[in-house]
Image (cartoon, coloured by chain):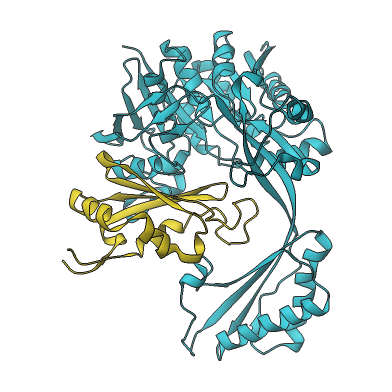
Amino acid sequence: MKTVRLGAGMAFWGDNIRAAVELVERGQIDYLCCDHLAELTMSILGKQRAKDPSRGYTRDVLDLMRAVLPTATEKGIKIVTNAGGANPRSCGEAVAAIARELGVTVKIAVVTGDDILHRIDDLMDAGVPFANMETGRPLADVRERLTHANVYTGAEGIVEALEAGADVVICGRVTDVALYIGPLVHELGWAPDDWHRIGIAAAAAHAAECGGQATGGLLDGGWRDIEGMEAMGYPIAEVSEDGSVVITKPDGTGGAVTVATVSEQMVYEIHDPGTYLTADVTGDFTQITLTEVGEDRVELGGVTGREAPEMLKVNIGYRAGFVGEVQFTYTWPDAYDKAQRGLEFLRERLKRADFQFDDDRVEYIGINSMFGDRIPEPVDADLDEIVVRYAARCQSASEAAKIFTQSVPLYNNGPAGVAGIGTRPPLKELYALWPCLIPRELITQEVELMEVAGE
Amino acid sequence: MSEQKVHDLAHGRSGDKGDVCNVGLVAWDDEGFDRLRRHLTEERVKEHFGSLVQGEVRRYEMPHIRALNFVMQGALDGGGTRSLRSDHLGKTMYAWLLRMPVPADD
């Protein structure tokens, strides 16, 4: 019976490439599946592309390719990645340039079709409302401020690319799980509408897609027992033709694969486990079972799927103002009282500077920065120190900049025992997401091939 | 049985999707799972999160791995990309649920 081993090469933009190199060199994998995109990433990439039409992909893919391409092509390991981001074609060209430089022979496929920014007005005219799923508001509210609009697309382009013989498949905003579903459909001959098996593929993908989070990273239950976090092995999903799945990792790497590590990943960022919506399938993980079947080997069973949703999710980002932020620390004696006075000072100075803001927030780091008013106010008069963080959302960068400017006099005019204001922090431009849907028949993926002939 | 915290019965993980935060709990044993199911109703969990969660809380189960998943709307100050919170991605929200008291048994 045929079994395919899929390694989780990258789990986010900027992830260390060491885990991917280990998977390629000694993970005995068939595919390296690399997820470089988070919800926010597309806004940053969209902005990069707007400044320079050759940019807009996650450039960590270049180091990754340089490190793994020679061994991967030699061993026949295929690489599937969404590093193309807002510009898959330029990403493909950059990877081709690296292949030429390394002298490797490789067929690179670029999968497009997810980017609908240039089609937005036509689609709106054609009656797609793009209504915000959380607020119900029409897209017209933010139409002028869009940074990008990409559809979470499925595995069909990846399958087509692999069927055309691609060794490296570079996509834009395909779903994270499509990076795994595509190779499984291609290798195991599963029909794209074999909902049960595609549901299994989605579950295996979800287990692996966040890299170290399935192998002991971010583990809450039993975190002290995880050895070698500094050189965490990334997961391998071993999927067989009959639909059996084992999650494991390369031998001799850090971390662990246990029922606890995989369970925590399976509940991570899912909503209704009976309706795990992806572009390829509606997964049903309600009856999932996890069983330890060996050292660092956990079998995943009990999952299934139903027909894929008719509507695809669109990731639309828009510019939403700026955040200004400052931190300062007061020490004993009277640390908390002085912090209160320092904050009052800052707010009064801001008011006199005609500060305009939409929303602000105060945190005492070390006390309530995570849980706000759910944590009681400090009553310990002997508190050693307290860090104040003040942040506000503003419409313009110049308003946001006032926060730091008006905090500096705390060093001279406010209560004693203050330090740590530091130098002017960079202002953060905010991007908000506009979650909405589009009928799937309006989206078609396209595959282009580039061949590099090595020496 | 005396009063315990969720932390005594389960481990957890949390994350974000837009302004929605989900907290998954995985009970260490069947008895703990039963207690969590009885006591961690959607209403009580919403009350426990107070001002941190503006919208509704829905609970889902994955019984064979003894997991409860709480999906909380309006839980990240507008969502990870624009939230003013230090924890804009809700990574520590699970820890607040671990602190919730589970009353002595019925």
- Rendering colour (chain B): yellow
Residue A319 locus on image (x, y percent): 75, 48
Rendered-image quadrant of the C terminus of chain A: top right
In this rendering, is residue A28 above or below A234?
above
Would you identify the image quadrant in which residue B43 lies? bottom left
Q: Report whether residue A294 is seen.
A: no
The quarter holding residue A423 reads: bottom right
The answer, for residue B58, to whether it is visible in the render is yes
- The residue lying furthest to the top in this view is A164
Vertical comparison of B69 with A246: above or below: below
Residue A189 pos. (x, y %):
43, 10
Using the image as rendered, state which of residue A92 and residue A190 is in the foreground: A190
x and y, in percent, of residue A233 in the image? 42, 38
Q: Nearer the viewer, residue A169 or A124?
A: A124
**Residue A382, image x and y in percent?**
48, 89
| Residue under the point 59% across and 36% down | A36
Q: Quadrant of the N terminus of chain A?
A: top left
Which chain did the image draw in cyan? A
Number of residue marks: 0
Q: Residue at x 52, y 69 (%)?
A: A372
Residue A125 against residue A454 in the figure, above or below: below
Image quadrant in which you'd find residue A440 = top right
Q: Is residue B18 left or right of residue B45?
A: right
